[in-house]
Amino acid sequence: MDKSEVKKWVDANMERLLSEYGVPHWEVDVVFLQADESDLYGQCHTSPRYERATIELNCPKFKTLEKLEKTLRHEICHILHAPFNWYAIAVEDALRKLNGMEPLIASLDTVFDTACELTAKNLERMHHGHKEAYKRKR
Ligand SMILES: [Zn+2]
């Protein structure tokens, strides 16, 4: 998809999606990448203290609106667990004050990134299950 298609869909749906996930008060900037230089469909950077996030979307990777929506929902799930970033930052800051901790910092960074991805996926599944249960009740 080209940038204008992706932007049009995001502009039309972002507010609704942020509300669905309980974070309509967050200020979220979306960056529309135009070069297919990454394997990632999207990425989310958060500042939980200020309830701000930047979501990068790799426009050329999206072949369907369904994949775009699934990716955007996933990136919004990263906003939900963002408060845990404080813990990771505090641990890293503490370890950087000691000598020779780079290997441990690198290992913990990998563990933290993996935990973030698994948490985002769990939140996606939980939200999907919640939506399905709501549909069945109606
Ligand atoms: Zn992710």
Image (cartoon, helix red, strand yellow):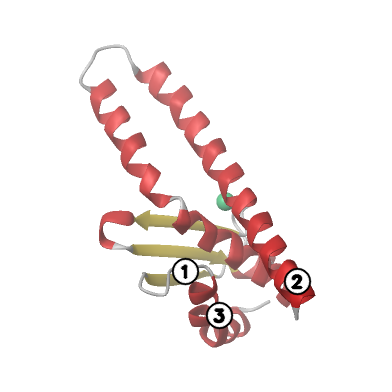
Tag 2 residue: 63
Q: Determine whether 47 is above or below 4 in the image.
A: above
**Residue 121: percent from the left, percent from the top?**
64, 50
Q: Are marks 2 and 1 in contact (CB under 8 Å)?
A: no
In this rendered view, identify the residue nearer to me: 91 or 123: 123
* Separation of residues labelled 3 and 2 (CA atoms): 15 Å
Q: Which mark lies nearer to you, 1 or 3?
A: 1
Is the distance from the Cβ of mark 2 to the nearest ligand 1 atom less than 8 Å? no
| Quadrant in the picture for residue 132 | bottom right
The residue shown at (49%, 76%) is: 19
Identified by mark 2, the residue type is: Lys
| Quadrant in the picture for residue 17 | bottom right
Image quarter (top left, top right, bottom left or bottom right) of the C terminus: bottom right
Q: Does label 2 or label 1 sit earlier along the sequence?
A: 1
In this rendered view, identify the residue nearer to me: 99 or 39: 99
The residue shown at (55%, 66%) is: 57
Dot 1, how many residues are within 10 Å of its Cα: few (below 14), some (14-19), or many (20+)?
few
Indicate left or right for 40 with 132 as reference: left
Image quarter (top left, top right, bottom left or bottom right) of the N terminus: bottom right
Identified by mark 1, the residue type is: Gly
Tag 3 residue: 10
* Separation of residues labelled 2 and 1 (CA atoms): 28 Å
The residue shown at (45%, 26%) is: 108
Q: Residue furthest top?
A: 100
Q: Determine whether 31 is above or below 95 in the image.
A: below
**Residue 84: percent from the left, percent from the top?**
39, 43
